[in-house]
Amino acid sequence: MAQGDYLIQNQSFPSFRSDLNSTLEAINTSNSGTSRPSSAVAGTVWLDTTNATNPTLKFFDGTDDISLAQLDYSANTVNWLDSTVSADLVNDLSPQLGGMLDVNGNAIGNGTEELIKFSETASAVNEVTVTNSATGNAPEISATGDDTNIDFKLTPKGTGKLVLDGLNFPTSDGTTGQFLKTDGSGNLSFDDVAGGTTAPYVSVYRNGDQSLSDNTLTTIQFNVENVDSASAFDTSTYRFTPQTSGYYFVSLNVGIGTTADNSIDKFQIKIFKNGSGITGATGQRDMDTNGFNYNDQMNTNVIVQMNGSTDYIEGKALIDVTSGTPRVESQQASMHIFKMTE
């Protein structure tokens, strides 16, 4: 390593050869030395070897030396020293590249920290790591497998959330059948679909005639279930006890009859909650003119609030006859109940 004055004097050939070789050696060693060469002019590039294993490449502007890069002889790397170099790489929003940017296995930083790191290993294909300089956590953006999927994740996970354009995604998965909903303020969460497991429904009917005492309000013995989604109907007590609180629609349909034609004077059906009637329908005829036939239908409906634990629903019927035995007709009495969407 050497420096020279870059001047060839008028001299004898041996002296000329020595002077020329000195100048060529200075060029060949990048004007290496522990101080700026005395021959330096504006535009001279020289290698400061004050640190023998990590020399610094410098540019003389005619007044001062500008440090360009430090050469690491041990790692065989070049560390650029001008802060604007890394700042431009990070902050330039419209970089112009003449070809593919190949930085596989390398990093782009701000001079003190890695902000973006590119890598490709057996477990991380085309992976881009973006480091949060404030916390040191690294949200990873990676194209995995056959490059058909893009995975967004936090590493380490911590308690942070993935935020896309102001939408805060939940940090854990929901359960099967749930959907993603918003609170209107950008916070997303998983919730159950209305009408699913939280909306029980029942359909029951009476299979076989049920004889009643004359003019007596009697519980209808619904003994067959078409459907009972939450096992809420008891075919031994003939009661519906909901497993979920809320508002329920209840429909009671009854076919009434008697063993004697034209003998029904009055009939009534009612929906009961906790032993008290909440809605009903009544039919009546004057027996002096004409009684009811032995097979007639009546329906009543109601919307009722249930607590989901102790409340219960029953269907009842009353038939007043002048002769014969009153009865609820086989397969003509049914009750349908379902929870309404709130």
Image: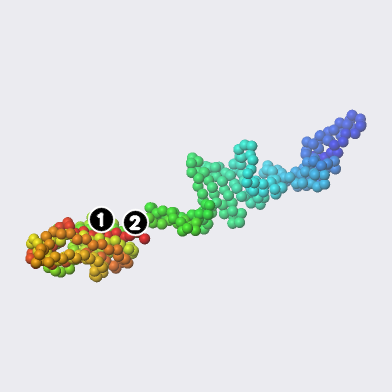
Q: Nearer the viewer, residue 335 or 98?
A: 335
Q: Is residue 55 visible?
A: no
Quarter of the image holding residue 101?
Answer: top right
Circle 1 packing at 10 Å, graded few (<14), some (14-19), many (20+), is few
Q: Are marks 1 and 2 in contact (CB under 8 Å)?
A: no
- Identify the secondary structure beneath mark 2: loop
Residue highlighted by disc 2: 195
User: Which residue is drawn at the image coordinates 85% and 43% (left, top)?
Assistant: 38
- Kind of residue indicated by mark 1: Val
Q: Position of residue 332 (x, y in %)?
A: 17, 57
Residue highlighted by disc 1: 227
Q: Is residue 246 left or right of residue 6?
A: left
Q: Is residue 144 left or right of residue 227?
A: right
Quarter of the image holding residue 198?
Answer: bottom left
Q: Earlier in the sequence, mark 1 or mark 2?
A: 2
- Identify the secondary structure beneath mark 1: strand
- Kind of residue indicated by mark 2: Gly
Q: Is residue 121 above or below residue 195?
A: above
Q: Position of residue 70 (x, y in %)?
A: 72, 45
User: Which residue is drawn at the image coordinates 13% and 59% (left, top)?
Assistant: 295
